[in-house]
Image: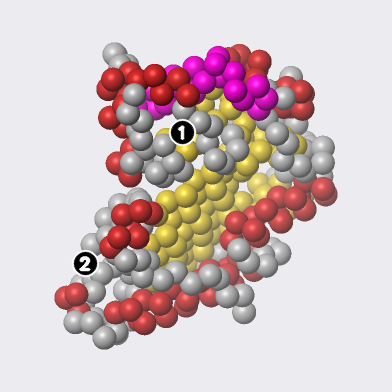
């Protein structure tokens, strides 16, 4: 049986460093109560007469009790360009850190992950009084197709982990694959350009301002970021993770704590193709023509 990486109790200090996606409620009752629920893998196939479109099978797995919660949603590539399908499958397996080779293996992985989380919960809380126990340990994986054209496909990945302590931790990222060969190509060039830095600054501003009639000033924007001087807003670094393509633009996404505190959440924004085109690589421009 595939054994996923165990998730251990986070100390209070480490939990503050890692960040959160919402507070977990206190555990009510004893862990000995067997209230587990499970939903087996589904099989919603998405097919298309266009041979250049990747057909996928949507696999769902959910199981929970008082000690562990697991939720998995994966759009598994079934048919399409072999190099692309193989690349996508390999990438999904890497994201799950397991030897996944098909929909059934995802269900097996979910069962193993649930058992691992439950074992970890018991190892931490069995010796504690019921009122001192916290919520179930949990893990979610959401791997879905975000955008697809004749030339590229972009997958979106979001995962949440809670292993004790005050908070859990969320990771979100996107990956664009070229259809002709299944490769993830570099998308940006001229990354030191002041003009690109200006687009990033305005993207961050737009993220926090939302639909407000009056966007935040530079001074107000500082309150949301690990930046102390207004001048530094002109030099916000690129995200650690590579950008990715939608059908209408390029998305930049910063992980929790990358440029702002926990309260700022996961900062992301899309730059339309007409604005980002001068900073795209030749290979990237060929994808969006």
172, above or below 269, in the image: below
Task: Please name which of the two marks, 2 or 1, marks the residue nearer to the observer.
Answer: 1
User: What percent of the width, then of the height, locates residue 275?
Assistant: 58, 15
Report the Cα–Cα distance between label 2 and label 1: 31 Å
User: What percent of the width, then of the height, locates residue 201?
Assistant: 45, 22
Q: Please tell me whether mark 2 sits on a helix, a strand or a loop.
A: loop
Q: Is residue 283 left or right of residue 98?
A: right
160, above or below 138, in the image: above
Count of marks, rendered view? 2
> Which residue: 55% across, 71% down?
4
64, above or below 80, in the image: below
Q: Write down the region rendered in magenta.
A: 188-209
> Which residue: 61% across, 63% down?
97
> Which residue: 20% across, 79% down?
130
Q: Quick one: 190 or 188, which is closer to the camera?
A: 190
The disc placed on residue 268 is 1
Q: Quadrant of the N terminus?
A: bottom right
Residue 44 can be seen, yes or no? no
Colour scheme shown? secondary structure
Q: Quick one: 238 or 160, which is closer to the camera?
A: 238
Mark 2, Cα crowd under 10 Å, few <14 / some 14-19 / many 20+, is few
Mark 1, Cα crowd under 10 Å, few <14 / some 14-19 / many 20+, is some
Label whose residue precedes the other's in the sequence (2 or 1): 2
> Which residue: 51% across, 63% down?
61
Q: Is residue 61 left or right of residue 263?
A: right
Q: Quadrant of the C terminus?
A: top right
The residue singled out by tag 2 in the image is 26
Q: Quadrant of residue 284?
A: top right
């Amino acid at each position: 049986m595939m054994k996923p990486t165990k998730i251990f109790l986070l100390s209070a200090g480490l939990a503050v460093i890692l960040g959160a996606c919402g507070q977990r409620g206190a555990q009510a009752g004893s862990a000995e109560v067997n209230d587990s629920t499970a939903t087996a893998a589904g099989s919603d196939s998405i097919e298309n007469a266009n041979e250049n479109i990747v057909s996928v099978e949507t696999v769902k797995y959910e199981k929970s009790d008082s000690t562990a919660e697991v939720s998995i949603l994966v759009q598994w590539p079934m048919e399409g360009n072999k190099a692309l399908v193989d690349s996508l499958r390999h990438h999904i397996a890497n994201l799950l850190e397991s030897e996944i080779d098909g929909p059934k293996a995802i269900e097996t992985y979910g069962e193993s992950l649930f058992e691992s989380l439950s074992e970890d919960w018991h190892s931490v809380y069995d010796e504690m009084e019921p009122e001192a126990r916290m919520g179930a340990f949990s893990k979610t994986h959401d791997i879905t197709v975000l955008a697809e054209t004749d030339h590229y496909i972009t997958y979106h990945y979001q995962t949440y982990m809670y292993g004790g302590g005050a908070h859990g931790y969320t990771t979100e990222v996107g990956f664009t694959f070229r259809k002709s060969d299944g490769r993830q190509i570099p998308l940006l060039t001229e990354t030191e350009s002041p003009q690109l830095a200006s687009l990033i600054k305005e993207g961050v501003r737009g993220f926090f301002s939302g639909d407000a009639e009056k966007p935040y000033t530079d001074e107000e924007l500082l309150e949301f970021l690990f930046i102390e001087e207004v001048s530094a807003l002109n030099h916000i670094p690129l995200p650690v993770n590579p950008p990715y393509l939608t059908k209408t633009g390029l998305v930049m996404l910063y992980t929790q704590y990358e440029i702002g505190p926990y309260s700022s959440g996961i900062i992301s924004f899309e730059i339309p193709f007409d604005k980002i085109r001068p900073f795209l690589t030749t290979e990237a421009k060929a994808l969006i023509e």
